[in-house]
Image (cartoon, rainbow, N blue to C red):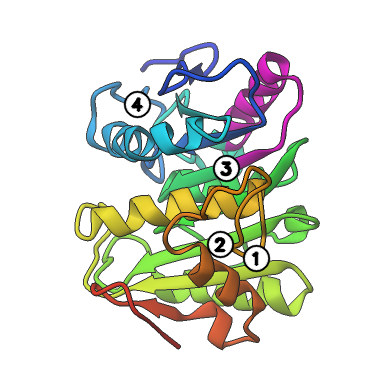
């Protein structure tokens, strides 16, 4: 059994300007129970690194650092909730490095559950769950003051789109700022419609760090594609704002 003393925070994915104004941290998927260390070149870790490489150049141009990390263990491990303190550790290290700039957390599958539970870490302004694993009765109080976007493919047979909808609906009813987007035809690995998943990460990061209404940022740069889709989902009443369908053609329907 492998028991690393602490998780690993990877270097920034892309060269950064002198002044960093925000951070995006991406976290990988895993298993329900395992104390084995994640494989550094395994599928879950590689998948989020692919997303990071896709979005980092554009975000770096706006002064945003993009990092990935590895958890200590592959598993959630019951009440231990092992990845959650790992995310908090990484957020603290990033704050030390960049001086406490605002941060966005994005996680896939188990990593999505981890970032949702670590939403109240200092400096976090937004959380994105990509095909997140969200069992019934998952807490919501930690979302206060943060924006949460959940995105799920209709062909996901590993984590439940229904569960992510129910979590989003409960969080909305409790007064939290939550939206949800559905990607027809996409499964759990995020490889189908990969470009759309990348665009959602990029657009949500822009929305949280620059302008919540999908407008140009302070430097006058045009918002990324789907920034308007995300803004409209947050503005729409439930249930429409929790089941915005993003078609393969890039069109939206409620």
Furthest residue in direction top, as rendered:
5
Q: Are marks 4 and 1 in contact (CB under 8 Å)?
A: no
Badge nearest the viewer, 2 or 4? 2
- Residue identifier under label 2: 149
Secondary structure at numbered mark 4: loop
Highlighted range, magenta: 84-104
Left or right of residue 82: residue 126: right
Q: Is residue 123 above or below residue 109?
A: above
* Res 200 → quadrant: bottom left
Q: Nearer the viewer, residue 152 or 167?
A: 152
Badge nearest the viewer, 4 or 1? 1
Badge nearest the viewer, 1 or 2? 1
- Residue identifier under label 4: 38
Give how far apart the Cα atoms at labels 3 and 1 are: 19 Å
Q: Earlier in the sequence, mark 2 or mark 4?
A: 4
The quarter of the image holding the N terminus is top left
Q: Earlier in the sequence, mark 1 or mark 2?
A: 2
Badge nearest the viewer, 4 or 3? 3
Secondary structure at numbered mark 2: strand
């Amino acid at each position: 059994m492998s028991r690393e003393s602490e998780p690993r925070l990877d270097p920034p994915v892309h060269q950064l300007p002198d002044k960093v104004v925000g951070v995006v941290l991406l976290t990988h998927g895993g298993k329900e129970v395992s104390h084995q260390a994640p494989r550094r070149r395994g599928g879950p870790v590689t998948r989020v690194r692919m997303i990071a490489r896709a979005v980092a150049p554009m975000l770096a141009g706006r002064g945003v650092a993009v990092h990935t990390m590895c958890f200590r263990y592959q598993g959630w491990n019951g009440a231990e909730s092992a990845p959650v303190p790992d995310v908090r550790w990484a957020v603290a290290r990033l704050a030390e490095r960049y001086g406490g700039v605002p941060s966005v957390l994005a996680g896939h599958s188990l990593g999505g559950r981890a970032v949702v539970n670590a939403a109240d870490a200092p400096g976090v302004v937004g959380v994105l769950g990509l095909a997140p694993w969200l069992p019934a009765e998952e807490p919501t109080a930690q979302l206060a003051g943060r924006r949460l976007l959940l995105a799920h493919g209709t062909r996901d047979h590993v984590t439940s789109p229904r569960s992510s909808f129910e979590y989003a609906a409960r969080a909305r009813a409790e007064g939290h700022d939550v939206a949800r987007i559905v990607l027809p035809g996409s499964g759990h690995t995020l490889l189908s419609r990969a470009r759309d998943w990348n665009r959602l990460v990029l657009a949500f990061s822009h929305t949280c760090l620059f302008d919540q209404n999908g407008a140009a940022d302070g430097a006058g740069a045009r918002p990324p594609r789907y920034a308007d889709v995300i803004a409209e989902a947050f503005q729409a009443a439930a249930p429409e704002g929790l089941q915005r369908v993003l078609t393969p053609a890039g069109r939206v329907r409620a």
